[in-house]
Image (cartoon, helix red, strand yellow):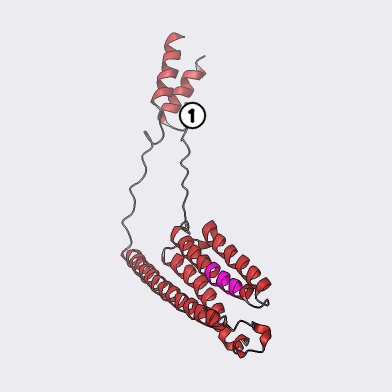
Amino acid sequence: MTSLAALVLGSALTVTAGAVDALPPAPPPDPRALKRAQRAERRRHTMAVVHTVVGVGLEIGAALFYAETAIWFFGDDDMPSSGCQGGSNSCGGGTPAVLLFPVGAIAMGVVGATQLSAGREAAIWNSPIFWAGAGVQLATLVFAAGFATDPGNHKLAADTTFIVGSLVGTVLQVVGAATAPPRDVEVVAHAPRVTPACGPTAGGMMCGLALAGF
């Protein structure tokens, strides 16, 4: 009985995953598959560069549009002491086409941030900093819309808040693009391989024969 117990214990300690059953050798790589993989990698790198260049260009364009918007807003706020109700033409605000500058600045900032994150192969929609920038821009629009119709200094404060808030929101979106997590995160969880003492191996057969002797 003691010898049988020793045999069971020895077989249980010597049976490990892959120690007896060797895996067959891997087949040689397919040259065509290697070429396809290389082409895919080159295309991925090229698209990353394109996205980055486009993103930088859009952010520069957004900065120029913000500057033009500031010139338009603050030039419009340069009014006489009588204010907008004094019959001055300086409060007209121009044609609706000038709205292209503030709207274009915000739009180019958002699209540019998404392009920069695409260049990094990152998921910008999972970035809280990007959404914080969008929230700042939305709050700025609400605040500016509430005071834009008031004459005098109220309109100046609204215009200043719009420029500063929108610009800060765009900067936060760019920071979010630079810090966003990768799109494809492969989480490989290696579970511990537990091989039973009496598994389908040579050692397992010895273990089974030993247990049959009891």
Q: Is residue 59 magenta?
A: no
Label 1: state its secondary structure.
loop
Q: Which residue is the site of mark 1?
A: 196
Q: Could you tell me what secondary structure mostly forms the magenta stretch?
A: helix
Quarter location, residue 131:
bottom right
Q: Nearer the viewer, residue 213 or 177?
A: 177
Determine whether 48 is above or below 14 in the image: below
Return the residue found at the far top. 2
Residue at 58% over, 83% down: 79
**Residue 132 placed where, x, y %?**
56, 60
- Pointer 1 local density, CA inside 10 Å: few below 14, some 14–19, many at least 20: few
What amino acid does circle 1 point to?
Pro
Residue at 48% over, 23% down: 208
Quarter location, residue 87:
bottom right
Which range is magenta?
156-165
Lateral position of residue 192 relative to residue 140, left or right: left
Q: Nearer the viewer, residue 36 or 99?
A: 99
**Residue 102 placed where, x, y %?**
55, 78
Query: Is residue 127 in sight in this rendering?
Result: no
Q: Is residue 158 magenta?
A: yes
Residue at 46% over, 52% down: 186
Lateral position of residue 129 relative to residue 30, left or right: right
